[in-house]
Image: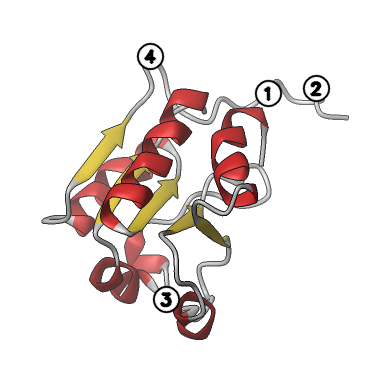
Amino acid sequence: MQAPALPVIRAAADGLIAAVNISDPSAKWPERELARFRRPVLLIVADDLEPERPSTPPSGWRCARMLRAWAKSAIVHGAGGEAEHYRLVVVAALTTGRAVMVETSSTCAVPWAEFLFPLPTLLILPRSGPHPIMPERGAMQ
């Protein structure tokens, strides 16, 4: 996780929430892991891992249907990370008990929000241009 996600890390370190991360679309639903927690849970779908792999719409995630059935609220995040976005998802977890944050590209954000309907969902899109912004060729060497 990067600096904007520090509110999530802090809330988990303080014992306010449990945070679970899923970054593999073929992963099984983490039922046993989630059942262990007796505090609010934030499940993060880490789907903005470009250039390692492109973002995947919900139809490509093995656990998507279980995620939708389990969650009580969601933030679909298809923009650059800001600490305020992560503060909001901590509040969502504390308020509803089971929150999901889908970190994805701007192209997959709307399909995720549509898939999660009718869950209360906040959709965060970039102010301008697509997300993620890919560096110039050779800039990552």
Real-space Cα distance between discs 4 and 2?
A: 22 Å
Q: Is residue 122 above or below residue 13?
A: above
Q: Is residue 138 above or below residue 29?
A: above
Q: Earlier in the sequence, mark 4 or mark 2?
A: 4
Q: Are marks 2 and 1 in contact (CB under 8 Å)?
A: yes
Q: Which mark is residue 139?
A: 2
Quarter of the image with the C terminus in it:
top right
Q: What's the amino acid at mark 1?
A: Pro
| Front residue of 20 and 50 | 20
Q: What's the amino acid at mark 2?
A: Ala
Q: On the rendered structure, is 78 left or right of 118?
A: right
Q: Is residue 134 above or below residue 59?
A: above
Give SS at disc 4.
loop
Q: Residue at x 24, y 72 (%)?
A: 69
Q: Residue at x 44, y 24 (%)?
A: 84
Residue 31 in sight:
yes
| Front residue of 131 and 8 | 8
Query: What is the x, y in percent for residue 101?
Result: 41, 49
Query: What is the x, y in percent for residue 60?
Result: 40, 67
Real-space Cα distance between discs 2 and 1?
A: 6 Å
Real-space Cα distance between discs 1 and 3?
A: 30 Å
Give SS at disc 1.
loop
- Which residue lies under the disc numbered 1? 135
Q: Earlier in the sequence, mark 4 or mark 3?
A: 3
Real-space Cα distance between discs 2 and 3?
A: 34 Å
